[in-house]
Amino acid sequence: MSIETSVQVTRLPSGLTVATDTMPGVATVSLGAWIGAGTRHETPEVNGIAHLLEHMVFKGTEKRSAQDIAEEIEAVGGHLNAYTSRENTAFYAKVLAEDAPLALDIVSDILQCATFQQEELERERAVVLQEIGQAYDTPDDIVFDHFQETAYPDQSLGRPVLGETRTVSALERSALWDYLRAHYGPQQMVVAAAGAMEHDRFVDMAAAAFTHEGFSCNGTTDAARYQGGDRREARDLEQVHLLLGFDSVGYLDDEYYALSALSTLFGGGMSSRLFQEVREKRGLVYSIYSFHSAFLDGGLFGVYAGTGEKEVRELVPVVCDELGKLSLGVSEQELDRARAQLRASLLMSREKSSARAEQIAQQLLIYGRPIPVEESLRKIAAVTPADIERVARRLMASAPTITAIGPIRQLESAARIAARLN
């Protein structure tokens, strides 16, 4: 299959990277700004500031109120959103092609001219504190924060994206300004568009919209130091929410595609080993899956399961046994299914302008260049059964990370689980 390359990239004198992925035959544009800064770029004292900042920029600028921002984008039928992750923050919109200048003006306005009024800060702080409380009350959500913190203790990569009640309650307006000015500089930002947009026109729009006066660049972080460990919280729940994980690989690792294929065939769908063995054959769970979370310099591989208090006794040995079997061999037919899933997911995502804008922005932040689709397809196709066996052994060579919430009395000890993996 030959896929025409439609991505163009321009780096402005300011250091800002501007990228487009033109899609003939569509009437819309997805555009936004992706910043290479997130929770990982916070100090312990201001944990949660990246996420609070993401909320606060929508609360008014020098020329737009919060209501103006909402009304202007919706008046043209568009939508505007944002997210914060451990390594990135993104602000993006989707509009009809003729309204792209308005959407880009709004995005650039909120990122450069937000006012952070004290009254709005207090209101939005209360909203975020409610969000933190809601996450704590959602065991299949908060268990993932515990998992991250246990895998990466005492470092920014292990802290929660939402922050903690203590730190968010203490954040001041000046701290928001300091973080914004230090981390939202042009060298850390990619402005991208996909859809009905001509590249040179978008470059001119971005150059005019993003002046970045007074912004600097502080993208330094501590190296990821995986440690692993065991954290359990007894709660009066119907289910045990369990995570078992290992030190994995980052985006830049040669084993990245092999690990992605392993995760897919192990617990990525209804034909996966975990789903078939644990749910279909044994009926131990309703929900079970594996995942691979990659970072710039490391990663986490994990298995999530929700199971009953009695069933957890049988579940853990089965999961450990199935993981061990991966290192002993996989069939070409099984790997073919995993490769097909990865390939289809990549190609299907290209039908959405929002996904394509996200892809090119993330690729530029991670690799410094757009990754041609055919290059990714070749790397997926090149994964072999021997690769799967090798990365499975690599996973099990690391200390496990175990986190659980619920009725955990029948969950095996960490030492017993570790022994099953050796």
Image (tube, rainbow, N blue to C red):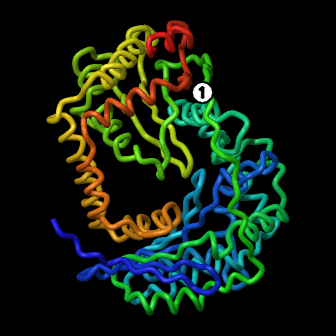
In this view of the protein, which residue sits in the foreground, 66 or 293? 293
Q: Across the whole image, how many numbered discs are drawn on residues?
A: 1
Residue 23 in the figure: left or right of residue 72: left
From this view, report whether residue 164 is shown above or below residue 111.
above
In the displayed structure, would residue 388 be above or below residue 190?
Answer: above
Q: Which residue is pictured at 25% across the width and 40% down the height?
A: 384
- Horizontal and vertical percent for residue 209? 60, 87
Mark 1, residues whose alpha carbon is within 10 Å: few (<14), some, or many (≥20)? many
Is residue 217 rendered to the left or right of residue 135?
right
Nearer to us in this view, 414 or 146: 414
Residue 349: image location, x then y, percent: 30, 61
Image spot of residue 340 (x, y percent)? 20, 47
Residue at 42% of width from left, 24% of height from top?
306
Residue 158, quarter of the rendered image: top right
Amino acid type, label 1? Gly
294, 297: nearer the viewer: 297
Q: Is residue 119 above or below residue 287?
A: below
Q: Is residue 413 above or below residue 29?
A: above
Residue 115 falls in image quadrant: bottom right
Q: Position of residue 33 (x, y in %)?
A: 55, 72
- Classify residue 125 as left or right of residue 402: right
Which residue sits at x=43%, y=8%? 313
Residue indicated by mark 1:
228
Q: Is residue 169 left or right of residue 203?
A: right
Name the secondary structure under disc 1.
loop
